[in-house]
Amino acid sequence: MAMKVALGVALAMVSLPAIAAPQIIAARGRWAALQDGALCEAASRSLLAAPKGKIQARAGISFDASGQRRGEFAARLSRPVRDGSTVMLYVGNLPFLLVARGNMAWSRGPAQEAAIVDAIRIWGGMRVEARSPGGGRIVDRYGLEGAPLAIDAAAACAARLAKR
């Protein structure tokens, strides 16, 4: 059953619009490690599937061969965020303030990225919260089953690419 969920998550990640589909490196639980050129990413879609025609929330941790991204957290929220709104990532009960624009949010730098990855390895769930332009609450929830494997596989992928 867990392998079916992981494969479904991996296929959902590959079905994102792109010029070329990313290669699936590893998948377990709700997370998959993907390679797209020089970028390797551990990624998952939110627990709640988006209605047809709506944005599917997803979160990922990116690594690249150049070393510029070493665990950068990014999330595509299910709805656009109100200008000036705070976007918070909660991993378990640990809060992280993110940088946001439109319906995207990112980690604030290497120290925060390392703390997020450490928290993901410990806790069983995470959520991204913000306010929509109309003031409504946005809450995108994620399971973390398989996240450590996907993160390790994405980091190893980037390290392998850097040696080329």
Image: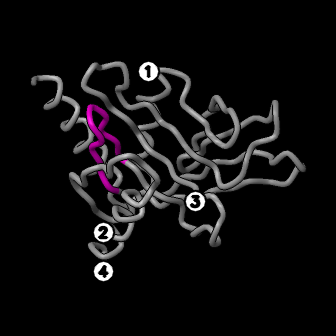
Name the residue rendered at 60%, 42% in the picture.
89
Q: Main secondary structure of the magenta part?
A: strand
Residue neighbourhood size for the residue with mark 1, other residues' Cα within 10 Å, grouped as few (<14), some (14–19), many (≥20): some
Q: Which mark is residue 7?
A: 2
Which of the marked residues, 4 or 1, is nearer the chain's N terminus? 4
Circle 4 sits in a helix, a strand or a loop, which is it? loop
Which of the marked residues, 3 or 4, is nearer the chain's N terminus? 4
Instruction: Please name the residue that numbered disc 4 is placed on.
Output: 1
- Left or right placement of residue 126 versus residue 157 in this view: right
Residue at mark 3 to residue at mark 1: CA–CA distance? 27 Å
Name the residue rendered at 30%, 38% in the picture.
40
Q: What stretch is highlighted in magenta?
A: 32-42
Q: Are marks 2 and 4 in contact (CB under 8 Å)?
A: no
Residue 132: % across, % down:
81, 48
Which label lies toward us, 3 or 4? 3
**Residue at the bottom extreme?**
1
Q: In this view, does 47 lie above or below 43?
A: below
Q: Is residue 33 above or below residue 45?
A: above
Name the residue rendered at 58%, 46% in the picture.
76
Which of the marked residues, 2 or 1, is nearer the chain's N terminus? 2
